[in-house]
Amino acid sequence: MIALVWRELRRAWSSGGLVLPIAFFLLVAILFPFAVGPDGRLLARIGGGVIWAAALLAALLPVERLVTPDAENGVLDQLVVRGFSDAGIATAKMLGHWLGFGPALLAATCVAAALLHVPGTALGTILIGLAIGTPGLAALGVATAALVAGLRGAGALAGLVMLPFAVPLLIFGAGATGGEPGAIKLLAAISLVLVAGCPFVAGAAMRMGRG
């Protein structure tokens, strides 16, 4: 399992899976003030929601490379022959996907918060929320990648499949930054459900793809 996670992490770094999501995340934070104006109070009020929306889209960027290349090259078949379960493979991909962008995204959030005039008191809550919610985004990304693997226009389909299921994470993540009571607990519950359930969904999709 550790070897599989390390393989996914190396692939993420070598294919731009680290640089591109973080660059996109920061680009949104840089361009958003130009769209709404330089009002610091307005940016501070909506900055948490902007950071969460940017994090969601950044997690979506590498989805197309998570499962499709391995399915087309026969790597998934070889892993199954060697005794790995489909859910175990999906779990390794989920961990590798999160390690590839999650910690770097948390570090980039400090820069994005400064660009969006987010106060220091809210930054801690945002970081806690992202630390809780990004594993759920990674799990959802792997499940989405497995569901659309091999389909024409998989990149566009991945967005259509993933975004509706990610809305609860976005709602409660942004709600936690606004001081909504219980939002962090609900965010943690949803992220835990995704982390626990998505590997089995992804595993079933990969098994059906081989059939």
Image: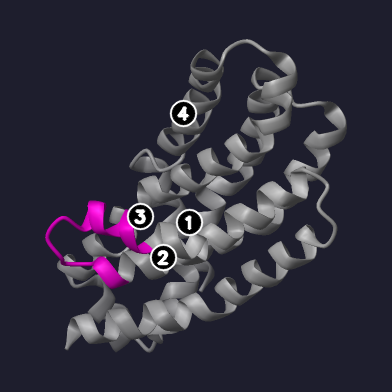
Can you identify the residue that label 4 sits on? Answer: 23
Between the C-alphas of marks 2 and 3, the distance is 7 Å
Can you identify the residue that label 2 sits on? Answer: 142
Residue 149 part of the magenta segment: yes
Can you identify the residue that label 3 sits on? Answer: 63
Q: Amino acid at mark 3?
A: Val
**Mark on residue 30?**
none
Label 1 secondary element: helix
Q: Amino acid at mark 1?
A: His
For marks 3 and 4, the one nearer the N-term is 4
Task: Say if mark 2 contacts mark 3, CB within 8 Å.
Answer: no
* Residue 65 placement: quadrant: bottom left
Classed neighbour count for the residue bearing mark 1: other residues with Cα under 10 Å, few (<14), some (14–19), many (≥20): many
The residue at 63%/67% (across/down) is 191
Task: Say if mark 2 contacts mark 1, CB within 8 Å.
Answer: yes
**Mark on residue 97?**
1
Residue 62 image point, x, y percent: 37, 49
**Picture layout, residue 120 above or below residue 130:** above
Classed neighbour count for the residue bearing mark 4: other residues with Cα under 10 Å, few (<14), some (14–19), many (≥20): some
Judge left or right: residue 69 versus residue 134.
Answer: left
For marks 3 and 1, the one nearer the N-term is 3
Judge left or right: residue 65 versus residue 47.
Answer: left
Between the C-alphas of marks 2 and 4, the distance is 21 Å
Can residue 5 be seen here? The reply is no
Task: Say if mark 3 contacts mark 1, CB within 8 Å.
Answer: no
Which span of residues is magenta-colored? Answer: 147-161
Residue 19 image point, x, y percent: 44, 33
Outermost residue on the top side: it is: 38
